[in-house]
Amino acid sequence: MKEMWDISWFDPVYSSQRVFRQLLDCMARPGKIAELRGGEGESGDFLYVVALALTLMDEETTFATLGPGWEEFVSFCKFYTGSRPAAPEQADFVFIDGDRPGPELIQVRRGNLLFPDQGATVICRVNAIYPGAFQSAGEGIVLRLRGPGVPGERELTVAGLARENLACLEKLNSEFPLGVDTILVSVQGQLACIPRSSGMTWC
Amino acid sequence: MGYVPIKGGKAAIEAAEELVRYFRLRGGSAPLEVKQIQDQMRLAVDRVMGEGSLYAPFHAALALKQAEGDTIEASFLLRAYRSTLPRIGYSLVADTREMAVIRRISAAFKDIPGGQILGPTRDYSLRLLDFQLAEESLTHIREFMGKFIPGAIRGEKGGMGDVLPSFPKVVDMLRAEGLLETPNKTEEAEEIIDITRQPLTFPAPRAARMQVMARGETGGLMALAYSSMRGYGNIHPTLGELRVGYVPLRVHHRTRPDEVVTVGRVLVTEAEVIARMDAGEDGIPRFTLGYGLCFGHNEIKAISMAVLDRTMRTGSKEAPAEDEEFVLYHIDGIEASGFTAHWKLPHYVTFQSVLDRLRRAQLVGRNEEGSQ
Amino acid sequence: MREKKVQSGYNFAFLDEQSKKEIRRRMLKAVAIPGYQVPFASRELPIARGWGTGGLQLTMSLIGPEDILKVIDQGSDDVVNAVNIRKLLVLTTGVRTTEDTREATLIQTRHRIPEEPLEDWQILVFQVPYPEPLRRVEPSEVKTREMHAEADYSRLWVYLYEDIVRWGEITIGAQYPVMVNGRYVMDPSPIPRWDVPRLNMAETLYLFGAGREKRIYAVPPHTRVEPLQFTDYPFRVEDFRCKQCALCGSVDTYLDEIIDDTTGARRYICSDTAYCAKRRRLKEEAGENA
């Protein structure tokens, strides 16, 4: 695992361009999975969350983290991105651990009808993401997405995502175009998106 | 296979660029030095810095040379250059009470503390073409400077000495007497957005309106302000104070945040217009104020800004100058000129599509006529 | 690490990284709310406002060293404005360019969708002069934004209805308003009606950039895009019946009308010049082989 503060592996021009294109592809095709990892099989608790922060955040943005364990990451973001910490209901980006039910999630900004784009982006850290319905030993939730970007229905399996959080996201997105857009990122570097336009069921 | 109208784009562009260069140089005169433009086309440089939204006299002068004197084109060059520059930081709020003044007048009072300082102005000169300028030589310049400078150093030439004076503000006097509206608390509490980093949305905060106007095209601002002064509106401005001078720019020290460092100074023009009275929250009538400030020496722009600042706060949208959307969407010289020029681009596809609709409508029309 | 300054002093893809970040954040929101216009700050570029600065800013924020770029205007790769935009992008990125639609990963366009089908690994970026489809019935941005918020499109429907009453047809040529995902009415940019059906349930991501008006919007793949129409006055594409391309013989492409200099005769040629050339080449090869 790489030390969080060493970001020499992340090129501000080319790495952020590559990560963004993967994000865009996944946001346009909800449930599609991209691999952020560079090839040599790295994984780390914060490695890929850091990659997303460096790609998306700067002085013009605010962020919040929900739950314990994010303290060092907060200092990291302030230092490297210039983004400012804010309360969950005000932040542009909200970071949450998928497996820890976070009741504060329900307060996250959904935008308003004039400016629905002011709804927050939720970055949810999970253990693993697999394409299709893949339920080994009962670990993981199978998500089924429908809507723009999905031909018919797309399935994916997410390990380390509490049902309470899913229910919360569903509730936040129940009044389209208001809502939040979710980026799932695993500690192994898999990436998938659930924009607010997606209909979602799970089992 | 005959006529294909759209090939050869690259060669055509290169040839056009060569022709532009040729047309600038074909007169055979000595090349213009950027320094000459910077010194002697002072007001054009100032205008380009304002509309180009970048305080950079050398670059503005260079842009003017490149644009053959077209201020909108020069401002556009400067703005495009600006896009490539990183934002290093934000300066602290500058207080124009500290301004080192070269010119300062009030139309509201005959006598103001510190006095009226005409400074460099043509306001009262007869607008006669000066044919002597056609013969101006270095000898003439030396002769003039030889006489002017010693007097200026002795302080005889009003405000042109080594140390420029600063003055209290006229509106502060009015405010102290309770004749002027008090600053709006909610406006002061607003976080100042940067319109080059965050999108402009409506209703726009006053800070955003000011920024759009400060980058606005002088002629565009003037036309709208003039429409209000002439009768499409009911503001009746009096020029409380107009001042031109240098204000210091300060920033927090990068590594020692408690320390404030002066990094330079910029020439600005500031206008404050006193406008018709309005009843405040306490029901007592007071004068209202319109404010304008722009880079460089550009009095028409600062006054127009101040008038429009006031008209946009009228609350009604009866006149064009009172509608903030109308004003702010139409005063940017770079946007307006770009779109006006874009009609020169090919529109074959859309025209073909409209042609199809017209022919169809004609067909429908003829059929109807035939059946009657 | 790769050399960042591709051309004397300028950042990769011209824009500074902060500007790209902002535009990227807006693009993600645009994709998440199909057809909704996301405001953005919009930078000045060395190309004039109204000449494709919106599309360009999207392309600059999207493009990477591995991309293969195609730029077209009016369907053609060689129109002056397309040449100019391509020149700036190549100068500041050094990417490979192509005229072949089937090879390009990133296509920037003004007024057309290429004739050949686009796939899921491609992105099409549109240059947009007027992002607001309601502008023809309401000049105020504050009011049109409210109309979108309430999904109140009645005034646009009345406009279309009155058009029919007056002219017997909807007279909108290019830039035909569409309903996206059943929620937002959207301006598809001044593409001909011919191209409108290709927006519906496509494989490709479509991104729209309006630089002067400072708006970004998107149509993700597999998204419903329906032209506004009445059941008794259905939407119709341009009529090229009995016409064919004078160069490649195509009868199923959008055609430009040409008036011959000398004879004054009217002829038609493909608006998508790269596709036209490809067809001619294939025909020649088929002829040689036969």
Image (cartoon, rainbow, N blue to C red):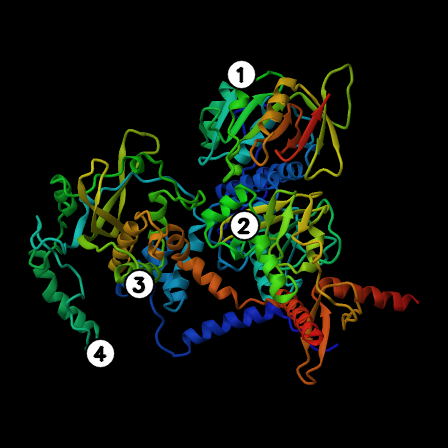
Parent chain of label 2: C
In the displayed orientation, state which residue is furthest to the bottom: C262
Q: CA distance from mark 4 to mark 3?
A: 22 Å
Q: Residue type at mark 2?
A: Gln
In what quadrant of the picture does the N terminus of chain B appear? bottom right
Element type where label 2 sits in the image:
helix
Parent chain of label 3: B
Q: Are marks 2 and 4 on the same chain?
A: no
Label 1 Cα crowd, 10 Å radius (few <14 / some 14-19 / many 20+): few
User: Compared with residue B1, is residue C66 higher up or lower down, i.e. above or below?
Assistant: above
- What residue is shown with label 4? B135
In what quadrant of the picture does the C terminus of chain B appear? bottom right
x, y percent for residue B98: 18, 43
- Per the rendering, the mark at residue C57 is 2
In the displayed orientation, state which residue is furthest to the right: C290
Q: Are marks 1 and 4 on the same chain?
A: no
Element type where label 1 sits in the image:
loop
Label 4 Cα crowd, 10 Å radius (few <14 / some 14-19 / many 20+): few
Q: CA distance from mark 3 to mark 2?
A: 30 Å
- What residue is shown with label 1? A69
Depth check, front residue: C71 or B212: B212
Q: CA distance from mark 2 to mark 1?
A: 38 Å
Q: CA distance from mark 2 to mark 4?
A: 50 Å
Camera-side mark, 4 or 3:
3
Lower position in the chain sequence, tag 4 or tag 3? 3
x, y percent for residue A81: 48, 32
User: What residue is shown at x 34% (from left), y 33% (from top)?
Assistant: B254
x, y percent for residue A112: 50, 35
Q: CA distance from mark 1 to mark 4?
A: 78 Å
In the rendered structure, the answer to whether residue C92 lies left or right of residue B131 reads right
Q: CA distance from mark 1 to mark 3?
A: 58 Å
Q: Residue type at mark 3?
A: Ala
